[in-house]
Amino acid sequence: MPTKRKIAIVDDHKLFATALAELVSQNENYEIFGIYHNGEDMKNKLRHSPTLPDLILMDVNMPKMNGKESTEWLKNNLPKIKVLALSMNNSENDIIAMLRAGAKGYILKDVTPDELHDAMICILENGYYNNELSSKAMHQMILGKPDILAQLKDRELELLNHVCSEMTYKEIAEIMNLSPKTVDGYREELFQKLHVKSRIGLVLFAIKNNLIII
């Protein structure tokens, strides 16, 4: 019988965390490793645990240690644990912040059970999850290919690094001493070359291919 993947949940809303644990445990491939009500609770218990979860479903907004701080702590101390961020907020800045902190994917709490399962299995098997990963071409790109990197110009690489920050495109244009229209042109070129459709796709590519310091 295959070994079940161990899943932990970090969320300060106890009712939601309990319901999520029940949903996850209905899948025969998973078992609930533990439920923690904030990042501090998670840190205190995991750093003394003889065993560790394979994946943590991480709430983004929590007291004491929020999702970003908790994910950064895991990346620095227990890097083998993968993180899937869960939030009610689809703010682009929040998504980028969580990905930079080390999360392997970001989904909203109102997704269907099927999408949650898809995100979990994609992270456990392939390392990252984003809606764009549904296409085979995007999946292969995320794994990294030298010929794709070779196509990128210096200015495109510079823009790619900046889009992984919290700056707006207007602010990026100012720091690159370019017009917003020129930055838009570079962005569209990156979308075409990397086969992505959003800023989040660019961030995932940059992180996976070690093009930024995170």
Image: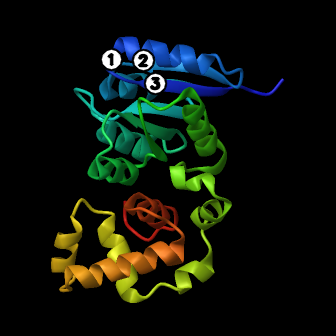
Question: Residue 158: which disc?
Answer: none
Residue 51 seen: no
Of the residues shown, which amino acid type is indicated by label 1?
Answer: His
Query: Quick one: SS at disc 3?
Result: strand
Q: Quadrant of the N terminus?
A: top right
Tag 2: amino acid? Ala
Which residue is found at the position 49% from the left and 45% from the top? 79
Marks 2 & 3, CB-CB < 8 Å contact: yes
Which residue was labeled with disc 2?
Answer: 17
Q: Disc 1 vs disc 2: Cβ atoms closer than 8 Å?
A: yes
Residue type for callout 3: Ile
**Cα separation between marks 1 and 2:** 6 Å
Residue 206 image position (x, y, % from top left): 45, 67
Residue 51 locus on image (x, y percent): 58, 26
Mark 1: give few (<14), some (14-19) or many (20+) Cα within 10 Å: few
Question: Could you tell whether 67 is left or right of 74 in the image?
Answer: left
Badge 3 crowding class, 10 Å Cα cut-off, few under 14, some 14 to 19, many 20 or more, is many
Q: Disc 3 marks which residue?
A: 9
The residue located at (15%, 78%) in the rendering is 174
Snapshot quadrant of residue 162: bottom left
Disc ID at residue 13 = 1
Q: Position of residue 22 (x, y in %)?
A: 55, 13
Q: Quadrant of residue 203?
A: bottom left
